[in-house]
Amino acid sequence: MLSLPELHLRAAFLRLVRSFFFGSGFLEVDTPLRQPVIIPERNIAPLQSGHWFLQASPELCMKRLLAAGCEKIFQICPCFRAEERGRLHLEEFTMLEWYRTGADYRDLMADCEAFLRYMEENFRMEFSDHRSSLGKSLFYGAEAIDLTGVWERLTVAEAFSRYSPVTLEQALETDRFEETLVENIEPHLGMEAPVFLCDYPAPLGSLAKLKSNNPEVAERFELYLAGIELANGFSELTDSREQRQRFNDELKYIQENGGKGGMPEHFLQALDNLDRAAGIALGLDRLLMLLLGKNNLSEAVTFAPSDL
Amino acid sequence: MYNASDLRKGLKIQIDGSPFIVTDFEFSKPGKGQALYRCKMRNMISGNQFTQTYRSNNKFEKADLDERKMQYLYNQENDYYFMDIESYEQLFITREQLGDNVNFLIDNMELQVLLFDGKPIDVSLPIFVNLVVTKADPWAKGDTSGTDTKPVTVETGYVLQVPPFVEEGEKIQIDTRTGQYVTRVKE
């Protein structure tokens, strides 16, 4: 449970998130947490609520709002993922998502740079900490993470050849992609400065657009700070036929493994009215944890499961 | 059976016929990928440690462990006999398995015995035991050698350093975790 001063800091933090997006011309939206159909994703176990589901992300509704004519929208909301518990995972957590039309994943990377600099600088003012490095470095543990300039865009393939004993192809062939990422690569990412790990193998970006000059990879990235994955963004796939095909593959896998799920028909219909767009999900509790210098996500939320 | 999602620090599982305890645990799930459960484990018999990453579809056998309250009876050479306080069942544990614990065993002492698959693998002694000093050099008053401890032998044959005023026939308290002298016991 947060202390009284920490509760004030969390409130200030959420106020700053909103003020950044208001200042950048985004519209704040709120969409239902309970939904009859959610995104079919094989690696995300949903929490059920009656015959409906608690959202794992507000993605479907937010993209429908884009299709309905919104240009820049953001949302701060709870998301739920069953059986995700650990130092950096809670089954219920706070997500920040923002979406833009007429944009791709590169625009989102630039958003991330501006957003994190803004948050670091203004959050530090809340501590009345007027060090000259305001907005320039984020201090976490023994690390001083340099936030200035343009952050490195490191492709997944490059990351494997730089940090791992096996190449990306070998890791995929032997079904060791996640293990290699966690054990060999992540500990190096974002230690001196934030890093965008980008261009994921196509099968790992279920709702992402493929690169036009290389359909083997998706226009998807993850932002890393201090070895911690903070945000996942991508250029949106807006081809509803292609999207239906990918959802079918996921649903088949889910049903074969005893899971439940259905086709998000309203979403697929809306997709036909959407042209170029990009969207990103950022774990707000993780960002607050980093800014507070805490080691565990439970120390950044008002009540942790163990407090309940 | 346990599922990977049951893994946590302190969980005891069985792998290839041996009991293991999870000593460190981290859940991770890189970017919409598979959930990974990274565990550091210690073999509860050999003490060997290893680290392994599991996936959500991995399953684990429960370690068949049983902790029972027992009384130490006697030893015959290298075999130390214990009796279950409730069932009066007797079993023995070898000197090798007991390790340093033999230094603190006295007749009729009650302790916890951990059994795996019906076989004893560990004993948990009381934190403090009182033992009689059976051999000690007399305290030479006015000794100016500057040493503030001297070695004594207790009834189990264990030798330890104590303050110079401790004399033969006295009872002393020893911390079984460190094997060190705590205080003199007056009865």
Image (spheres, helix red, strand yellow):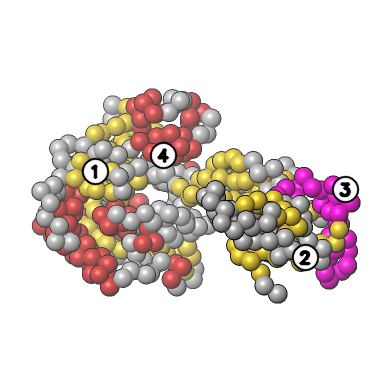
Amino acid type, label 4: Leu
Pointers 2 and 1 within a single chain: no
Q: Position of residue B158 (x, y in %)?
A: 72, 52
Q: Which residue is mark 1?
A: A144
Amino acid type, label 1: Ala
Q: Residues within 10 Å of mark 2 (few under 14, many from 20)?
A: some
The reply to whether dot 1 and dot 3 touch (C-beta < 8 Å) is no
Can you tell which of label 3 and label 4 is closer to the viewer?
Answer: 3
Q: Which residue is mark 4?
A: A204
Amino acid type, label 2: Met
- What chain letter is assigned to the residue under label 4? A
- What chain letter is assigned to the residue under label 2? B
Region of the chain picked out in magenta, as a range: B75-104
Q: Which residue is mark 2?
A: B109
Can you tell which of label 1 and label 4 is closer to the viewer?
Answer: 1
Q: Please indicate whether residue B70 sits to the left or right of residue A143 in the image.
A: right
Q: Please indicate whether residue B74 sits to the left or right of residue A267 in the image.
A: right
Q: Which is nearer the N-term, disc 1 or disc 4?
A: 1
The reply to whether dot 2 and dot 3 touch (C-beta < 8 Å) is no
Q: Position of residue A204 (x, y in %)?
A: 41, 39
Q: CA distance from mark 2 to mark 1?
A: 56 Å
| Above-or-below relation of A56 to A188 | below
The reply to whether dot 3 and dot 4 touch (C-beta < 8 Å) is no
Q: Please indicate whether residue A132 sits to the left or right of residue A204 in the image.
A: left
Helix, strand or loop at label 2? It is loop
Helix, strand or loop at label 4? It is helix
| Above-or-below relation of A16 to B45 | below
Q: Which residue is mark 3?
A: B77
